[in-house]
Image (cartoon, rainbow, N blue to C red):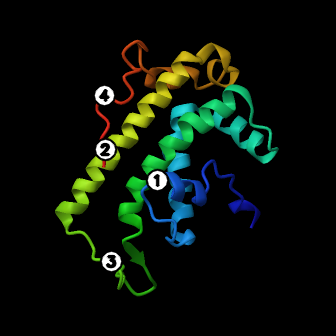
């Protein structure tokens, strides 16, 4: 289906290697999570013009320079953290034609609600910290990336970035270690 053609910034393999989500999780469940994070968490932060530039470069296998740096060092780590957060919900619930319910597995016991909420709280802290680091990078490189500073939504993007990058570089001041 041509309408469902989508260029992923993050692969399931990379997520499985660097994230907390098990690599053996069904790809059918993981791809929608990646897609949602990419469109709802990343595109609003980097803006549509930069988003589309990265999509074009990925399709052409020509991601280089600052675009490669922001993708590999900031966008992908941010996506991994948000994907892990979303996976705690979406991989434990299943929607079928008859009902919606919890998945069960003979090899693992499900967390109770409190444990799951504690895990989700730690994961969202990490995700927000990575997003903060991404925003600081964008602010520091604003003038060097025309898709940011010449974008029709440049004012909107700039409002979401930290006003003073001196203190925004405390990337790991409140990050959780699991």
Q: Are marks 1 and 3 in contact (CB under 8 Å)?
A: no
Give the residue displayed 67% in from the left and 21% down from the top.
145
Q: Is residue 177 above or below residue 101?
A: above
Q: Residues within 10 Å of mark 2 (few under 14, many from 20)?
A: few
Q: Which residue is mark 2?
A: 177
Please tell me whether mark 1 sits on a helix, a strand or a loop.
loop
Q: Nearer the viewer, residue 24 or 62?
A: 24
Q: Are marks 1 and 2 in contact (CB under 8 Å)?
A: no
Q: Quadrant of residue 175?
A: top left
Q: Earlier in the sequence, mark 3 or mark 2?
A: 3
| N-term-proximal mark, 4 vs 3 | 3
Q: Provide residue 122's location: percent of width, then percent of height.
A: 28, 47
Residue under label 4, please give it.
173
Q: Is residue 49 above or below residue 85?
A: above
Q: Split into 4 quadrants, where in the image is the N terminus?
A: bottom right
Task: Give the spatial CA distance, label 1 vs label 3.
Answer: 19 Å
Quarter residue 120 falls in: bottom left
Residue drawn where x is 52% and y is 73% of the image: 26
The residue depicted at 43 percent of the width and 48 percent of the height is: 82
Task: Determine whether, in the image, residue 74 is placed left or right of residue 97.
Answer: right
Label drawn at residue 155: none
The residue identified by callout 1 is: 19
Per the image, label 4 sits on a secondary structure element best described as loop
Question: From where the camera sits, is residue 49 visible?
Answer: no
Q: Name the element at disc 3.
A: loop
């Amino acid at each position: 289906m041509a309408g469902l053609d989508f260029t992923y910034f993050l692969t399931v393999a990379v997520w499985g290697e660097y994230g907390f989500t098990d690599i053996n999780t069904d790809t059918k469940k993981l791809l929608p999570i990646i897609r949602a994070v990419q469109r709802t968490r990343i595109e609003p932060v980097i803006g549509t013009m930069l988003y589309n530039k990265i999509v074009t470069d990925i399709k052409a296998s020509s991601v280089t320079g600052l675009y490669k740096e922001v993708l590999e060092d900031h966008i992908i780590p941010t996506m991994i953290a948000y994907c892990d957060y979303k996976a705690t919900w979406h991989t434990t619930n299943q929607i079928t034609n008859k009902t919606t319910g919890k998945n069960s597995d003979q090899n693992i016991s499900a967390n109770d609600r409190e444990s799951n909420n504690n895990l989700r709280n730690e994961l969202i802290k990490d995700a927000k910290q990575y997003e903060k680091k991404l925003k600081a990078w964008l602010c520091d490189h604003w003038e060097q990336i025309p898709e940011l500073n010449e974008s029709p939504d440049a004012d909107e993007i700039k409002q979401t970035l930290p006003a003073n990058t001196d203190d925004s570089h405390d990337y790991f001041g409140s990050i959780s270690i699991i």
